[in-house]
Structure formats: C-alpha cells, structure tokens
Amino acid sequence: MVETIGKGGQSREAQVSPDLYAAIAEHLATAGEPLADLRGYQAAWRRAIEAVHGQVTGTHGLRRLSSQQYYAKTYAKMRAAGLSSAEARCTARQEAVSLLGHSKTRTDQAACYLGAA
C-alpha cells in the first residue's frame, strides 16, 4: 500500500504491485522528494495518453471511467450476494463515491461520476 495526499489534503491508501512499490520506495530513498510536482504530473499524463494515440481530457475522464467500472463490479457482487436491485445500486453508488474520496452521502458526486447508474 502507498499513501497519497490528494485533493483537499485528504490522505488515501492505494494498493500497488510489489514492483511498483519497490520502485517508488527506491526513488524516495534516493531523491527524498515526490516523483513530480503538479505540472510535471500533468505533462507526463499528457505524453502517456498521446503515446497511445488517445484523446487527452485530463484525469477526470479516467476517474469517471474507473468509478463506473468499480460501480458495475460492486453492483454485480452485491446482487450475487442476494441484495435487491435497489439495495445493490445504493451500496455500489456509495462505495464508488467513497473510493473517489468523497462522502458516501454526496449524491451530487454520484450523479457526476456515475450518471443514472
């Protein structure tokens, strides 16, 4: 697990592969500073998307897509566990919004990222 400080100064943990963890740990041990500042991160993101001939729309497009995929998987898991469609939808929406770093009760964020899901 790695801890990151994101929007609004909120701390969150993310699971990464052992190889990525080792590479990050090595960088921080030798450089003692973050991999990139905000502008460096944005430039690297743009280059990576352009390298695969993708359309650069910033990171919110990826956040939206990943939250929608997470919602779909969670919804299916909840339905398989026996929850009703409404219960599974509510639980999956709350978990997806929480994963994005927002309060589970933020229905506006659920609508923004998940639409009518």
Image: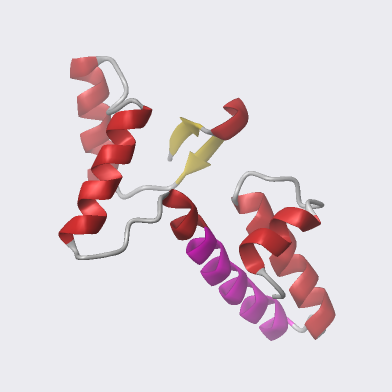
Query: Which residue is found at the position 63% from the left and 77% from the top?
Result: 77
**Which quarter shows the N terminus?**
top left
Query: Which residue is found at the position 56% from the left and 69% from the top?
Result: 68
Residue 82, compared with residue 49, is above or below; it is below
Left or right, residue 29 beside residue 82: left
Residue 110, visible in the rendered structure: yes
Q: Position of residue 107 (x, y in %)?
A: 79, 57
**Which quarter shows the C terminus?**
bottom right
Q: Is residue 76 magenta?
A: yes
Q: Main secondary structure of the magenta part?
A: helix
Give the mark count.
Answer: 0
Query: Which residue is found at the position 67% from the left and 55% from the top?
Result: 97
Left or right, residue 94 beside residue 61: right
Q: Is residue 66 magenta?
A: yes
Image colouring: secondary structure
Residue 61, compared with residue 117, is above or below; it is above
Residue 7, compared with residue 93, is above or below; it is above
The magenta region covers 64-81
